[in-house]
Amino acid sequence: MKLQTHYNKINIIGTIIIFCFATIGYYFLLSYVLTDQLDETLIVEEAEIYDYIKKNNSLPEASIYDDQQIYFEKNNGPHFRIFKSAEVFHPLEKATEETRQLIFTVTVKGQQYIAHIIKTAEWTEGLVWIILFSTLSLLLLLTTAFFFINRLLMKKLWYPFHQTLSSIKQFNLSAPGIFTTPATSVTEFRELNESINLMAEKVTQDYQTLKSFTDNASHELQTPLAVIHSKLDILIQQPELQQESMELIQRIFTAVEKLSGLCKSLLLLTKIEQLHFSGKETVSIKKIVADKIADMQEWIRLSKLTIEQKGVDTIILSDKELVDILVSNLLRNAIQHTPEKGTIIIETGNDYLKISNTGLIHLDTNKIFNRFYKDGYSGGHGLGLSIIKQICDQYKFHCHYIFLEGHHHFTILFH
Amino acid sequence: MRLLIIEDENELAHDILLYLRKEKYVCDVAGNSLIALSKIETQDYDCILLDINLPDGSGLKILEDLKTNRKNDGVIIISANNSINDRINGLKLGADDYLVKPFHLSELSARVEAIIRRKMHNGNNTMLWNDIFINTVSFEVRFAGKVAELTTKEYEILLYLMANPGKVITRTALINHLWTEDLGAGENFDFIYTHIKNLRKKIQQTVGKDYIKSVYGIGYKLSDK
């Protein structure tokens, strides 16, 4: 739910509740004030009756007017004096009406009477309703006006926030342009923008550091590796070396080369991440596959593998070196993991490349593209498939793995 | 023949010097571009080994400098950077070859040999070691005067061994030299074994000597002892 809707919801419900209570309270207040006023006129009448009795030593005449009746009746009870509201039949109007009465006892010439002063309260009631209605309409009008004003105001007030939001949405870590948030005079938004700018800067910096760390670390490792390598090359020239030492040196060589290969793969991954390969050439997938097979012929022959290339050629527009790396990694992966005398089928077709090879077990589909994933008997460094995945992710290809009828199938869709 | 090694890593420079000096080369070492430039100014080199990442700037500047001064020195870039773009940039600027660290010294030696051969002999590209003669332009190989028929791989192995006579060459170095594609072969050396066996047999049949000595556990050596 939008903030605006939230705000309106709370606002409207709150206003309605306050209105209800205010209306009830207002009604009672108004009727109290008006009744009080009426009571005062009743007291004035009472005083007039007392005055009359004092002057004339007799009761005044009973009277009936539109808005007032006075009459007396004999009584023998105790003295009392009460105000009350009641509906009374008005003989002139020939209808019952809302009245306010003052009933009290007076004694004239030793006889006790009950005096009734009845004043009509019809107009008071009407007044209450008129006042109530007009006030309520005014309030309703005001609320409606506030609602629309608020809507406009909120839109205007929140404008910098929405702008900030849209610039956050456009923020891309792997292609960071200059991240800017709009200038605003509202302190809260300015603080928000400042914090976001700070955060973005930090995130970008950390990301760059991380990226350049892999880059630099792999790079810097090559020099000491080169030193180890050359020292070993010098070492094996020593004439007095025994066969055992030679074998040890060979193992060191292998380890150094493995490490160097690992560094190169990590560097390659960073390069792919940084979209370093930006060439746009027409690349024939079938030709690249044929070239790679030729390059690896010796290896294929030694492993006694059967390679079958089928399907029509597909020409894509991409960076040749990149496609080369992709195909080479796929093929190397297939050769490495095909048991002796196995088969590798390479199929090309409309915008796809599919490499299938004999396999023993289903690989973990969720993990095979992870960095440093090894299936247990793989001698590689576990980066080959993640390089493939990285290429596909960064250059909008799709790669897909499935194990079917004793074969691993890797499919690359170039669109 | 005179070489200049421009490399800021002393240990590496020292090893290169040690390895190449035993061949017929005289080597100078420069640890930064300043020294390198002053050496290039005063001395003509047959081949310059150039590291790209130098403490006082890029080695490519030296390369540009060499080319603007129309120096004819052969240049091999040795760099930790293994990307085709860097390679192309280096070669565009006039380098003759590009070698990625870490490398086998035998590989470096073979490349230096090739460049000097190309520069020095002006078309008459021949190599001679004992009874073995190679013309690298016509690909003619003679053992004790007799023309030998070699496969491409055998020819390349022989050329590599002749660029490093008397040196122990690891099988890994040979595999890396013969197959550009990194096969990740690990310790599977069957790759090279058949080729070496056939080459050895061909030499033995004509010359009567086994020049290719197996160095157990590690590789081979071209030797007449």
Image (cartoon, grey):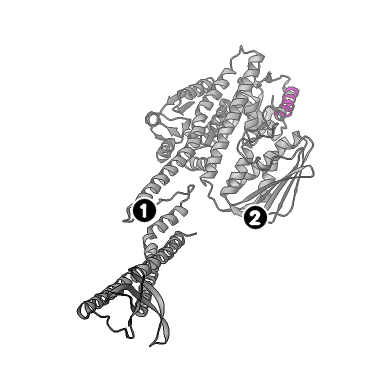
Q: Is residue A345 toward the left or the right of residue A146 in the image?
A: right
Please name whichever residue, A193 or A259, is drawn nearer the observer in this view of the structure.
Answer: A193
Q: Residue at x 37, y 51 (%)?
A: A193
Q: Is residue A390 toward the left or the right of residue B32 in the image?
A: right
Query: Which residue has dot 1 on it?
Result: A189
Q: Is residue B136 toward the left or the right of residue B24 in the image?
A: right
Quadrant that contains the C terminus of chain A: bottom right
Mark 2 neighbour class, 10 Å CA radius: few under 14, some 14 to 19, many 20 or more:
some
Chain assignment, label 1 = A
x and y, in percent, of residue B201 in the image: 75, 24
Q: Secondary structure at mark 1?
A: helix
Give the CA distance from mark 1 to mark 2: 52 Å
Instruction: Tell me the chief SS of the magenta region.
Output: helix
Using the image, determine if residue B224 lies above or below residue B186. Answer: above
Using the image, determine if residue B42 lies above or below residue A268. Answer: above
Q: Are marks 1 and 2 in contact (CB under 8 Å)?
A: no
Tag 1: residue type? Answer: Phe
Query: Which residue has dot 2 on it?
Result: A315
Using the image, determine if residue A331 lies above or below residue A60. Answer: above
Span of residues in magenta: B192-205
Using the image, determine if residue A72 lies above or below residue B8. Answer: below
Task: Determine which of the numbered discs, if any, sits on residue A23 in the image.
Answer: none
x and y, in percent, of residue A325 in the image: 61, 43
Q: Does the magenta-highlighted stretch encompass residue A265?
A: no
Q: Are marks 1 and 2 on the same chain?
A: yes
Q: Earlier in the sequence, mark 1 or mark 2?
A: 1
